[in-house]
Amino acid sequence: MTNMGEMFGDLADQMVRDSLKVGDVHRIPLDQHNGITPKDGEQERNKYFIILGFDSDGNVIGGLVINSKINHNLPTNVTDYQLPVSTGQCPFLHHNSFVNCSRLITADRRKFSHSSYMGEVDKDLLSLIKETVKESPTVNKKQLQIFGIS
């Protein structure tokens, strides 16, 4: 039997999914299907995900992840496109971090819920993120087009 808390939780989750917008940040579980390598034998990792766009059906969300550190073992065409963000810019962060602008990833709308919502990035930071993504040599024009990033 469904209790009231579960019913309102499901309704709140659906309301969040119906109102997702560019610039929202959610902390969601991602895995290899999303291009994230889980650590220590885990199946998935919770990552901050900045929504940058939606596919033509509105089902799949294109976005970027926030990492606490830069992996300097990666090639420079990846490390050069790690945009620093501070806790002042993103109060939901526990420490200064980096937005990985070198790779757009996708996440299914069902991963997002009222409890995954962390906040949103302001329009100036969002504009800087989009410009950095567009300059990245590892993001192709078709990806930008699919998610409406122009």
Image (spheres, rainbow, N blue to C red):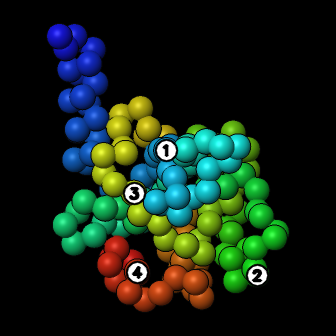
Q: Residue at x 30, y 66 (%)?
A: 54
Mark closer to the chain start, 1 or 2: 1
Cβ atoms under marks 2 and 4 closer than 8 Å: no
| Foreground: disc 1 or disc 4 | 1
CA gap, disc 1 to disc 2?
A: 27 Å
Q: Residues within 10 Å of mark 1 (few under 14, many from 20)?
A: some
CA gap, disc 2 to disc 4?
A: 21 Å
Mark closer to the chain start, 1 or 3: 1
Q: Residues within 10 Å of mark 4 (few under 14, many from 20)?
A: some
- Is 56 located above or below residue 12 in the figure? below
- The residue to which callout 3 is attached is 107
What amino acid does circle 4 point to?
Gln
Quarter residue 1 falls in: top left
What amino acid does circle 2 point to?
Thr
Q: Residue at x 47, y 87 (%)?
A: 140
Mark 4: secondary structure = helix
Q: Nearer the viewer, residue 37 or 113?
A: 37
Mark closer to the chain start, 4 or 3: 3
Mark closer to the chain start, 2 or 3: 2
- The residue to which callout 4 is attached is 143
Cβ atoms under marks 4 and 3 closer than 8 Å: no
Q: Position of residue 107 (x, y in %)?
A: 39, 57
Mark closer to the chain start, 1 or 4: 1
Mark 3: secondary structure = strand
- The residue to which callout 2 is attached is 76
Mark 1: secondary structure = strand
Mark 2: secondary structure = helix
Q: Position of residue 148 (x, y in %)?
A: 33, 77
Q: Is residue 101 visible?
A: yes
- From the viewer's perspective, is 94 left or right of 53? right
